[in-house]
Amino acid sequence: MQLTSVLFAASLLLAQAPQSTSDALADQRAQARARYVKVENELGRASLENLSPEQREARARLLEVLDAYVQRADFGVQSIDPLARLPQFVDRDGRRCAIAELLHATGEDALVASVAAQHNTAWIVDLSADPRFLGWLDTHGLALDEAARIQGPPMVVPGTPSGSTAPGAPGPGGLGDVVPPPSTGGGPLSPGGGPSARPGPSSPRGPLTGPGAGPGAPGGGGMGPRSPGGEEFIAYALTQGDTGWRVWWEYNKLEFLRPNRFELDTGRDDAPGRTFTSQLDFTRRVSSPPLVEALRHRDARIRAAAASALGRFGGPDVVELLQPLLSDTTLAVRDAALLGLGASGRAGAGELLFDLAVDGEARGVQDLGQRGRALAIVALGLCRKAGLDASYDAKLVDLVRASAGRLNEELGVAAMTYAQFSPAPELLALARELAFDGAQSWPVRSRAIEALQHARDATTLGQLQHLLSGSQMELRRSAALALGEYDHDLVVAGLLTAHDLEKESMTRSYTLVSLGRQGGVKAREQLVEALDSSDGAERAWAALGLGILAREAGDPSLASELAPALKRVKLVGERPAYWLALGLARAEGAFEVLSHELVDAKDPQARMYAAQALALLGGERVHGVLRERLAAERSDLARSQIALALGVLGRREDVEAISKSLAGLGDPMLQRQVASALAFHGTSDALVRLGAMLADEKLDAAVRASAIDGLGMLLGKTPPLALAATARSSNPTLQPPWLREIYGTTF
């Protein structure tokens, strides 16, 4: 019996033993051949109408060389980093990559040797400024993005020690404007350098709370209304290890579910003996006195909401009014005062916020600590967005550079968030340094990568592609999302290659949604192909990407595969992603599907997503079914989201129905969400209703706080949800808790 147990254990060990080197390389060789066949098919479908006869002939000969290379399957072996998928023009045994092989076949050995010697890990984007290479492409009828798709990294020998380089490849060098590969050691901000001391986390640090128990939850002293389902859901989902499409949607949905902007007529007499240039200004003046009084309210939620609303009004006395609240005993009130100062755009607010950013202190303000410093920097970014002068860009860079070595994490993340509000050249230069500085923490590097999406040059694109193919998972995730926002002809080729080669599921998923943002025929083909994936999570992401692609192009027909694909979905948790995609695309037949799910879906959360998808779809029929379902819905969660959907539609006749839906809601969190729906509604009727809610002492303080925040949204001098724009395409797994909290606000 004992012997049997021993033999059984041994068999298990053998079964779990790693593949041999030869087997692993054989598998990689087969995968590489499959990728090249896919690329060859892409090249075969390309239009040649703009090519001369000579170019067509040269291209045909080149593709014959490529096919022979693929059939030979001698693809080269990487010797740099076993965890990365970086290209090598020539490997240590002299094997050429596909592009190098094509150059060799056409007599361009000098160019091959130059690249191998100066920058052996060059991606095609790194060569895009080299006139020799561009001339060769033109002669042979190849587009730059086609060359990028041909290129692929070599195979990796399991267990290869990292840090070695191929003979004849001394490391980064100058090939025109070629970008050096990313450094894994110290950068300009880290004398002595060295790799990061901690691995990248798979979830945010710090305690997270369950649904309804986050900073915006009842009794939590929260900062007023959150985006419906936002902070509370994100916190809960991340504690459950859910980093999938639902979390991404919570961070990005306000890009699509936009509040209606309330504007009053101008040039009317609004009070006896006084003429104001706008009713808007008059309404702000009328609203300000009760809000000033609310700054002294016993309930912290009321104080916080009043601070944010007055900041948005941006009156001349805003600094004087809000500065005392920076010493409030409640953290949420201090946070709201900082963000309110930022939303004002006032010069005095900028001066105060920068002083606080330097050391957390200012005259008459208690020490706010590192978290307060970070939030002051984010608020300063809001201030820049609201019109503060550009001199603060350079001041902030100087402040960060003065912190040589490993940055305080909060400071670094905040500075890179500021850079998304004001992507000035000096801030983008700082972002490049931080993104490649191995001494910095993962969240700092991730935010720096996200800031780089605002650059538009090939050099930065090359840097992002190196990160996308590197060994560090969290940085690959961030680069995949950032590239979705990047405007360059080679982005799609890079994302397609990354999806072909990436093994980590979240990074693959992020490439799909980024392809949706990029659009185009090749991106659509990849998304349609992914709809047939054996991985249900990947299918959900592909659906969302296709919905975004169709929406961006304004062509619902581009998402024609969604409806038939939905019929094949068997996983209940996967279906809402398709519903949202149908709404995003405004696809034909979407109304029938979504209206059915709004009524018949068994799970209230599913009906919540159906309501949001209908809001995305819009139209008269949508309005009718939402009104009907609001009256019939028994789930508080679903009813609050139907109210939000009606708010997004912005029909005047819905104000009363939205208001009445509050009556049956016992949960203040859901009451806040319905109050937010009135703010989203954006009509004068909604404004009147919000004012009545503010005056109603019988309502929960959280609801009254939501009414105040709604007034700020409707009457603020700058558009709401500016913070939501910086959350767009950010990596949810690296969001510090303090930043995730303020993303739930309506700033």
Image (cartoon, grey):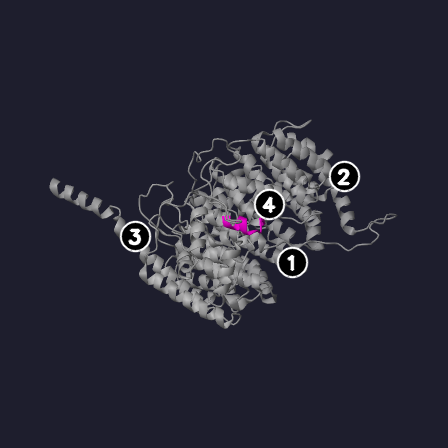
Q: CA separation, marks 4 and 3?
A: 42 Å
Relative vertical location of residue 210 with respect to residue 662 in this rendering, above or below: above
Mark 2 residue type: Pro
- Percent of width and height locating residue 461: 52, 50
Residue at the disc numbered 1: 650
Q: Nearer the viewer, residue 17 or 146?
A: 146
Residue at the disc numbered 2: 316
Per the image, label 2 sits on a secondary structure element best described as loop
Q: Earlier in the sequence, mark 2 or mark 1?
A: 2
Q: Earlier in the sequence, mark 3 or mark 2?
A: 3
Q: Nearer the viewer, residue 438 or 664?
A: 438
Per the image, label 3 sits on a secondary structure element best described as helix
Mark 3 residue type: Leu
Q: Neighbour class for label 4 at 10 Å: few (<14), some, many (≥20)?
A: many
From which residue to which does the magenta span run? 454-462
Q: Earlier in the sequence, mark 4 or mark 2?
A: 2
| Residue 408 visible in this rendered orientation of the protein | yes
Task: Answer with left or right where residue 251 lies relative to residue 27.
Answer: right
* Circle on res. 420: 4
The quadrant the N terminus occupies is top left
Mark 4 residue type: Gln
Q: Earlier in the sequence, mark 4 or mark 1?
A: 4
- Percent of width and height locating residue 13: 21, 44
Q: CA separation, marks 4 and 2?
A: 27 Å
Residue at the disc numbered 3: 25
Q: CA separation, marks 3 and 1?
A: 59 Å
Q: Earlier in the sequence, mark 4 or mark 3?
A: 3
Give the foreground label among 2 and 1. Answer: 2
Mark 1 residue type: Gly
Magenta stretch, main secondary structure class = helix
Q: Earlier in the sequence, mark 3 or mark 1?
A: 3
